[in-house]
Image (cartoon, rainbow, N blue to C red):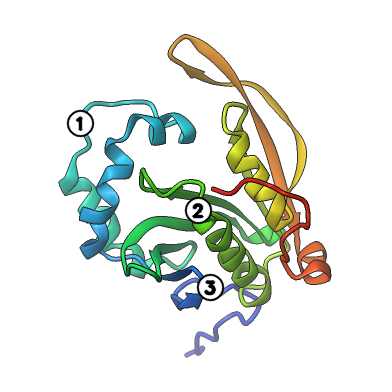
Amino acid sequence: MVDHVRDVSRPDFLSKPLLRGEQVLLRPVTVDDVPALMPMFLDTEASRLTGSHDDGVPDEGRIRTWYDSRREQDDRLDLAVVELATGNVVGEAVLNEWDPGNESCSFRICLVPGTYGSGLGTEATRLIVGYGFEKLGLHRISLEVYAFNPRARRAYEKVGFVAEGVLRDALLWEGERVDATVMSILAPEWLQHGGRPETTGHASV
């Protein structure tokens, strides 16, 4: 019988970390976080910024089942964003769509209404991106941001994401077609700059 040996080159997504910054703590998201996260699913502005078309009232049961299974995922990382000053769960940060052949992942973040503009999202982004490069061994982390969300784009630029191109008319939102900008950051860029904020005055998510 051949023993199954773990591929040491495979990112360890099953180990869910605790990542602490000055304003936020990232920790594994759980089903107990659903009440705090529900405003994200109910808020029309959050839906617009993420391009999530309204399919009716969110099914809390399905949402609870989804979050209850996050610890078992070995190909993605779902972390709750906790504001240290209050102890409140204010959003989630996710590395998903892992592409093992190219050592890359997608990234997304969403905060509950009322927490935008305080720098929480920027710090959460920096923490999970750093973990992706320094601990998971990723080479590329990418995202898409819609043209009507310049605040988020500036926050991503603060962390080191670079615009690569435009997906024209990628979203149809209430009769308007909206472009999406593809952005990415590479491991050498992160390791060179350490994810430090830019000195210019960017807005935060």
> Which percent across, then down, holds residue 21?
53, 73
> Which percent across, then down, holds residue 143?
62, 45
- Residue ID for mark 2: 118
Give the side of residue 74 with respect to residue 100, left or right.
Answer: left
- The Cα–Cα distance between marks 2 and 3, rounded to whole angstroms, is 12 Å
Q: Residues within 10 Å of mark 3 (few under 14, many from 20)?
A: few
Q: Earlier in the sequence, mark 1 or mark 2?
A: 1
Give the side of residue 32 with respect to residue 125, left or right.
Answer: left
Which residue is outermost to the left? Answer: 61
Please name the amino acid that badge 3 sits on. Answer: Glu
Label 2 SS: loop
Towards the viewer: 43 or 177? 43
Label 1 SS: loop
- The Cα–Cα distance between marks 1 and 3, rounded to whole angstroms, is 36 Å
User: Residue 127 occupies which quadrant of the picture?
Assistant: bottom right
Give the side of residue 173 with respect to residue 101, left or right.
Answer: left
Label 3 SS: loop
| Residue 128 showing in the rendered view | yes
Q: Is residue 151 above or below residue 130?
A: above
Towards the viewer: 89 or 129? 89
Please name the amino acid that badge 2 sits on. Answer: Ser
Give the side of residue 165 with respect to residue 116, left or right.
Answer: right
Q: Residue at x 78, y 39 (%)?
A: 164
Q: Earlier in the sequence, mark 1 or mark 3?
A: 3
Q: State yes or no: discs 1 and 2 in contact (Cβ < 8 Å).
A: no
- Residue ID for mark 1: 57
> Which percent across, then down, holds residue 13?
50, 71
Please name the amino acid that badge 1 sits on. Answer: Val
| Residue 95 showing in the rendered view | no
Image label count: 3
- Residue ID for mark 3: 22
